[in-house]
Image: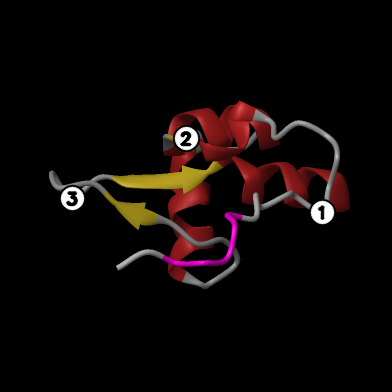
Amino acid sequence: MTNPEPHTPIVASDPRPADPDDDKLLTPGEVATMFRVSPKTVTRWHQTGKISAIRTPGGHRRFRAKEIKQLLGDA
């Protein structure tokens, strides 16, 4: 069985190339350096819901660079 409709390529709505750093995950220390605070402060921000984080299989927190860049832009 084949699909009689031709394949339509998906085109991104934003013509700018995606920033590869947006997919990067940052450590609490890296985020702390960007905001000039301690890594413990970054951990507290996560605990209070100010920023989101993911956990590595080893249980460490990592922060999405895209979200951090947005916060820096708002600051």
Q: How far apart are marks 1 and 2 (CA)?
A: 27 Å
Single out the mark in the foreground, 1 or 2: 1
Q: Residue at x 70, y 35 (%)?
A: 18
State the residue in front, 21 or 17: 17
Determine which residue is flagged by label 3. 59
In the rendered image of this protein, does residue 9 appear above or below residue 21? below
Secondary structure of the residue carrying tag 3 is loop
Amino acid type at image mark 2: Leu
Q: Residue at x 58, y 54 (%)?
A: 7
Q: Residue at x 47, y 46 (%)?
A: 63
Which residue appears farthest toward the left when viewing the image?
A: 58
Image-based side of 68 in relation to 63, left or right: right
Q: Which of marks 1 and 2 is nearer the N terminus?
A: 1
Amino acid type at image mark 1: Ser
Q: Does the magenta stretch include residue 45?
A: no
Which residue appears farthest toward the bottom when viewing the image?
A: 48
- In the rendered structure, which segment of residues is drawn in magenta? 3-7
Amino acid type at image mark 3: Gly
Q: Residue at x 39, y 44 (%)?
A: 62
Image-based side of 19 in relation to 33, left or right: right
Secondary structure of the residue carrying tag 2 is strand
Secondary structure of the residue carrying tag 1 is loop
Q: How far apart are marks 1 and 3 (CA)?
A: 36 Å
Determine which residue is flagged by label 1. 13
